[in-house]
């Protein structure tokens, strides 16, 4: 299988490292193209693949600019009965997401942790489904929810085998999980809100702009993906992730700040507000957790900050960037099927992406 990688940031670089760590003799993959937002490189499939040590230099020294029409043409000309092709989108770009129908139509499989296509405009999502059905090219997106945790594959199997998903609830954001696991432990005191947000960013959990996590949109996107994957008639047909009832944590004065750096610089101005929320929860013997729910019975999809007793599993069993996802179904009732573990970070996200790629071979 020939593999083209678009986006070589945190997850993209780790994905390339994991892909190239499969011993050459036993690897079913050949890396044929790399693109950042400013450079691109295409390798002759007959030549040797770049090494883990050299690919960054080769890409940064390339004088070619990304040209996705050209890439689509080159890749589709290489497809034949014994050669499959996949593009791995490791960006968070809407522009790249809008190209999936074109790629799938050309017979190119699409693998991605990028949530934009599956949680954005319903028209794009439906187009992806229909084009993929027509051409037979597949799109796989395990890492869009819970990073490498087997959330999407589990949900697809529950649905495909005829189980009825009643409700999915949990902590879906690695960033929000880390922030509140550190910030709200049951004690009225602790580190400042802005300091834990900065550490979450340093650890690679946040979206490129941390406000995309704190406004709840990242969770709303994940809930939209889950809701669409369930596809139940009792759930509202979400036109986009903006249809999810989402309670943002962004102070109104910080709405619309263009860069993550500027946003983090001003966040300490609001530490006292978050301190008060922590103290209120603590006075009730509770902790704060940012949770999401897709409720097929009530027909409700929502995300927001809730208080939980210090004995609740959301308070006792989560650490680091852990996600916890509970599937309440006809079969898994009254006790839900639970998936838990790191839900953000380069290594686990790239693993989910490579796992999807392995499903194609
Ligand atoms: N980090 C995590 O824990 C998780 C991340 N994800 C998802 O994985 C994706 C990548 O995240 P992450 O690696 O952390 O983010 P980064 O910001 O580190 O990487 C994104 C990369 O995309 C590149 N890019 C943007 N636009 C284009 C373009 N048009 N063509 C080529 N490259 C482009 C950027 O390149 P440049 O620097 O050149 O602009 C950047 O290097 C996101 O969609 C995120 O939501 C999913 C689960 C967990
Ligand atoms: N920013 C996201 C990354 C994974 O999707 C998160 O914090 O969960
Ligand atoms: Na996953």
Image (cartoon, rainbow, N blue to C red):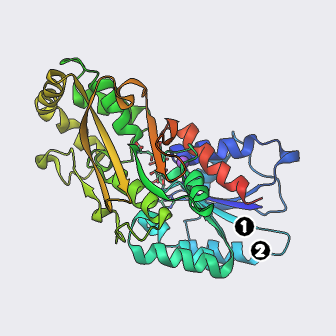
Tell me the residue that label 1 is attached to: 85
Instruction: Check contact, mark 2 vs mark 1: CB within 8 A.
Output: yes
Q: Is residue 209 visible?
A: no
Residue 217 percent location from the top left of the image: 31, 54
Residue 313 percent location from the top left of the image: 39, 29
Q: Is residue 304 visible?
A: yes
309 lies above or below 226: above
Residue furthest to the right in view is 25
225 lies above or below 12: below
Mark 2 / mark 1, whichever is N-terminal: 2
Give the crowd class for mark 1: few <14, some 14-19, many >=20 residues within 10 Å: many
260 lies above or below 42: above
Tell me the residue that label 2 is attached to: 79
> SS class of the residue under badge 1?
strand
Residue 283 percent location from the top left of the image: 14, 21
Real-space Cα separation, disc 2 to disc 1, in angstroms = 6 Å
């Amino acid at each position: 299988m020939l593999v083209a990688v678009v986006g070589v940031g945190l997850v993209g670089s780790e994905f390339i490292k994991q892909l190239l760590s499969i011993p050459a003799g036993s690897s079913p993959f050949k890396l044929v193209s790399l693109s950042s937002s400013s450079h691109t490189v295409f390798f002759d499939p007959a030549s040797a693949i770049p090494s883990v040590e050299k690919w960054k230099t080769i890409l940064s020294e390339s004088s070619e600019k990304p040209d996705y029409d050209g890439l689509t043409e080159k890749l589709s000309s290489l497809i034949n009965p014994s050669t499959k092709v996949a593009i791995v989108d490791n960006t968070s770009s809407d522009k790249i997401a809008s190209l999936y129908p074109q790629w799938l139509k050309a017979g190119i499989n699409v693998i991605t942790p990028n949530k934009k296509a599956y949680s954005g405009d319903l028209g794009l999502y439906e187009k992806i489904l229909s084009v993929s059905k027509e051409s037979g090219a597949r799109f796989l997106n395990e890492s869009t929810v819970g990073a490498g945790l087997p959330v999407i594959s589990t949900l697809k199997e529950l649905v495909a085998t005829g189980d009825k998903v009643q409700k999915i609830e949990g902590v879906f954001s690695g960033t929000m999980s880390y922030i509140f696991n550190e910030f709200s432990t049951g004690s009225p005191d602790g580190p400042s809100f802005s300091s834990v947000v900065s550490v979450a960013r340093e650890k690679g959990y946040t979206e490129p702009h941390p406000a995309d996590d704190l406004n709840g949109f990242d969770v709303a996107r994940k809930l939209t993906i889950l809701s669409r994957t369930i596809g139940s008639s009792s759930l509202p047909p979400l036109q986009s992730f903006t249809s999810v009832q989402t309670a943002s944590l962004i102070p109104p004065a910080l709405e619309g700040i263009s860069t993550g750096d500027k946003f983090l610089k001003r966040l300490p101005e609001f530490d006292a507000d978050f301190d008060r929320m922590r103290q209120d929860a603590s006075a009730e013997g509770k902790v704060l957790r940012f949770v999401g729910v897709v409720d097929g019975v009530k027909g409700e999809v929502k995300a927001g900050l809730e208080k939980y007793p210090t004995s609740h599993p959301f308070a006792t069993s989560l650490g680091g960037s852990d996600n916890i996802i509970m599937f309440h179904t006809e079969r898994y009732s009254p006790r839900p099927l639970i998936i838990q573990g790191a839900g953000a970070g380069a290594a686990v996200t790239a693993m989910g992406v490579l796992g999807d790629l392995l499903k194609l071979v």
